[in-house]
Image (spheres, grey):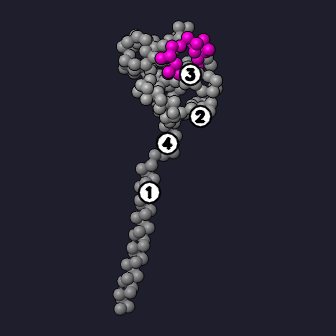
Amino acid sequence: MKDNSRRGFMGMAFGAVAGVGAVASLYAMKKSWDPLPSVKAAGFTTLDMSAYKENELVTEKWRGKPIFVLKYTPDMLAKMTAQQKSRVLTIGDSTFMVTLGLCTHLGCIPGYNPDEQSFLCACHGGQFDFTGDVTKVPPPRGLDIPPFKIDGNKLVLGEAGPEYAKMKETGITL
Ligand code: FES
């Protein structure tokens, strides 16, 4: 009888230790599956949109890819067609082109000519207008627009806000 209760106690103690160990190892496993904070942060890029100058192309980086940011002049905005306007991001009082800086043909990086206000892809002669829409093949479509969310005067790349969702819905970007 005495022996039995000792065995029962030992069994319970062992069970408790094993249970704590199991929980601890599950927690450790979960921690190792979760992305590191630095990896989580790397998925998003926040741009301060007050920093850009009109008709001056700036290449930013998001998830290792080039991102074109072009702030429009009032003249550029005034001469846009409705199709071109559908690609425009309005942030505060300013308007922008924000696209991936990769040609939709085979992925070269097009160059911007501020005098002609157009892009030329030197690889195979593809051209894009100042909204990133294609004007000369072989690129099959305009420059793609990355997922974005407008947050005051900032733009968060990597997060899909309502303006981006509408662009996807209407086929402005893939
Ligand atoms: S990669 Fe740009 S035209 Fe071919």
Q: Are marks 2 and 3 in contact (CB under 8 Å)?
A: no
Label 3: which secondary element: strand
Q: Amino acid at mark 4?
A: Lys
Q: Amino acid at mark 2?
A: Asp
Q: Could you tell me residue 97's position as x and y percent?
A: 53, 21
168 or 127: nearer the viewer: 168
Mark 4, residue position? 40
Label disc, if present, on residue 96 of the rendered structure: 3
Instruction: Identify the residue at image location x=63%, y=27%.
Output: 92
Give the mark toward the camera: 1 or 4. 4
Query: Sequence order check: which comes first, mark 1 or mark 2?
Result: 1
97 or 17: nearer the viewer: 97
Query: Sequence order check: which comes first, mark 3 or mark 4?
Result: 4
Q: Label 3: few (<14), some or many (≥20) within 10 Å?
A: many
Give the mark toward the camera: 1 or 3. 3
Q: Could you tell me residue 63's position as x and y percent?
A: 47, 33
Q: Are marks 1 and 4 in contact (CB under 8 Å)?
A: no
- Alpha-carbon distance for marks 2 and 4? 19 Å
Magenta part of the chain: 71-88
Query: Sequence order check: which comes first, mark 2 or mark 3?
Result: 3
Instruction: Identify the residue at image location x=41%, y=68%.
Output: 19
- Alpha-carbon distance for marks 2 and 3? 15 Å
Instruction: Identify the residue at image location x=52%, y=40%.
Output: 41
Give the mark toward the camera: 1 or 2. 2
Q: Are marks 1 and 2 in contact (CB under 8 Å)?
A: no
The quarter of the picture where residue 58 lies is top right
Q: Label 4: few (<14), some or many (≥20) within 10 Å?
A: few
Label 2: which secondary element: strand
Q: Quadrant of the C terminus?
A: top left
